[in-house]
């Protein structure tokens, strides 16, 4: 439990945005299901990505990290895949990674072996009911602990028709999209409610196509999956992460001029919408090639629909707290089942800093102010809450004292180093 003091200072400069965590998960799994060797470039060994690597190794995949001389953080890896998962280890530790858990459960259900999933933090409380319904329909044995982890499964997925809700988590759909093409028969996924987080499904479909799989997407409501398909090994480089870039784009809007590089303007990432949201709020944002420039701006409140970009809510709540007028964030109820209850976490902690944030069942109402006061906050052991509160310090009158600042290692291990690179000033507090 690390406590730090962040001094109020504007940030400015140029920052290379780390690779997309969402794409890294997907590329690792596709490479792991390919017969042969794939080299994946631009991979960041965050805690979540390491969890997926270890999980794949439990299913027979061999992964070798190659240290690059010029960059000790971003590393290429060699993945020697298995065309069909094998239960090498009977226990898979997903740490705190929801993507790892939900993506790997259907793959484990291809082995026919008894496999136990475990994890840490709030992962054990993340909903898994859509899979339980499938297990019951297909007579796959499973044993769970009060609906969560540890979870033990034994059985084999069968081809057929899969009906799922589209408004719980797109991760269930992605998990099935990875597994169903390997079955000896065709399958169909039918969504019984409109799909939220469409961008994440688009990332999945695009990555599957790059590894030679064919999925028919019928308006994001039905997916036709032919059986007996084969993943083909591919060398693939991961593009920059708009989810992480959003913190620096908001920092540039609040403080000094910041250039964020390695951001693909044609990206399928749903969080690319941050650029449009910032512009709608009055942000001075311009893009050239792979670089986005954010300049200090006087922003105003708007209504933000978070249905397709839930990960942006913590940092957008920070910007809204420092924008003129009211901001409403709607359709954000799924944030309550993330690493923390993010609606409660970000409203509680921003209000400690002097913001005016009202928590609603499915969103937030935020009255903007010119500055925040500062004070003591906690990250709730949530990487996105920690990073959002760090950016809030830019417009505080007094320092921000943060407990559990190490939560950033889940997705962005060198966030604090980049924060200081842009002019931030951080001091470690004496806990004793």
Image: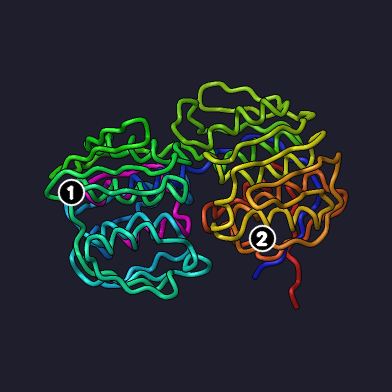
Q: How is the image coloured?
A: rainbow
Q: Which residues are magenta?
A: 28-57
In the rendered image, residue 391, in percent from the top left (x then y), is placed at 71, 46
Confirm whether the magenta stretch covers residue 44. yes
In the rendered image, residue 100, in percent from the top left (x then y), is placed at 39, 57
124 shown above or below 270? below
Residue ID for mark 1? 182
Left or right, 99 with reference to 3:
left
* SS for callout 1: helix
184 shown above or below 239? below
Quadrant location of the N terminus? Answer: bottom right
Residue 302 lies in quadrant: top right
Within 10 Å of disc 2 (Cα), the crowding (few <14, some 14-19, many 20+) is many
Res 278 label? none
In the rendered image, residue 119, in percent from the top left (x then y), is placed at 44, 69
Q: Residue at left 48%, top 41%?
A: 196
Residue ID for mark 2? 379
Residue 132 lies in quadrant: bottom left
Confirm whether the magenta stretch covers residue 190. no
Residue that lies at the very extreme toward the bottom in this rendered image:
432
Q: Residue at left 53%, top 66%?
A: 122
* SS for callout 2: loop
* Pick the front one: 275 or 332: 332
In the rendered image, residue 358, in percent from the top left (x then y), is placed at 76, 50
Q: Residue at left 28%, top 64%?
A: 136
**N-terminal label among 1 and 2:** 1
241 shown above or below 158? above
């Amino acid at each position: 439990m690390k406590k730090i003091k962040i001094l109020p200072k504007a940030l400015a400069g140029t920052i290379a945005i780390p690779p997309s965590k969402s794409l890294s998960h997907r590329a690792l799994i596709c490479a792991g299901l390919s017969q042969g060797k794939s080299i994946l470039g631009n991979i960041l060994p965050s805690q979540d990505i390491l969890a997926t690597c270890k999980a794949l190794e439990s299913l027979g995949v061999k992964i070798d990290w190659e240290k690059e001389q010029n960059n000790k953080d971003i590393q290429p890896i060699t993945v020697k895949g298995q065309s069909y998962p094998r239960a090498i280890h009977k226990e898979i530790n997903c740490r705190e990674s929801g993507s790892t858990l939900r993506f790997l459960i259907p793959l484990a259900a291809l082995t026919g072996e008894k496999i136990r999933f475990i994890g840490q933090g709030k992962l054990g409380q993340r909903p898994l009911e859509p899979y339980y319904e499938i297990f019951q329909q297909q007579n796959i044995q499973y044993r769970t602990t009060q609906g969560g982890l540890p979870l033990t499964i034994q059985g084999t997925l069968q081809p057929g028709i899969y009906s799922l809700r589209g408004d719980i988590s797109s991760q269930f759909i992605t998990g099935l999209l990875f597994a169903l093409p390997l079955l000896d028969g065709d399958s169909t996924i039918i969504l019984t409610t409109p799909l939220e987080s469409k961008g994440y499904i688009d990332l999945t479909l695009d990555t599957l196509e790059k590894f030679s799989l064919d999925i028919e997407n019928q308006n994001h409501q039905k997916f036709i999956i032919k059986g007996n398909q084969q993943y083909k090994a591919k060398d693939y480089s991961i593009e920059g992460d708009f989810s992480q870039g959003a913190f620096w784009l908001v920092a540039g809007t609040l403080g000094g001029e910041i250039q964020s590089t390695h951001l693909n303007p044609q990206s399928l990432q749903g969080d690319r919408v941050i650029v449009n949201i910032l512009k709608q709020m009055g942000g001075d944002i311009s893009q050239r090639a792979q670089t986005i420039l954010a300049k200090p701006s006087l922003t105003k409140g708007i209504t933000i629909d978070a249905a397709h970009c839930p990960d942006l809510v913590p940092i957008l709540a920070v910007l809204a707290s420092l924008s003129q007028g009211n901001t409403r964030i709607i359709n954000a109820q799924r944030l309550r089942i993330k690493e923390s209850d993010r609606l409660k976490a970000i409203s509680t902690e921003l209000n400690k800093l002097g913001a005016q944030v009202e928590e609603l069942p499915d969103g937030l109402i935020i009255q903007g102010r010119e500055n925040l006061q500062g004070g003591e906050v906690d990250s709730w052991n949530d990487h996105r809450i920690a990073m959002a509160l760090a950016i809030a310090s830019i417009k505080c009158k007094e320092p921000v004292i943060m407990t559990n600042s190490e939560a950033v290692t889940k997705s962005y291990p060198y966030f604090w180093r980049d924060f200081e690179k842009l002019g931030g000033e951080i001091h470690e507090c004496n806990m004793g």
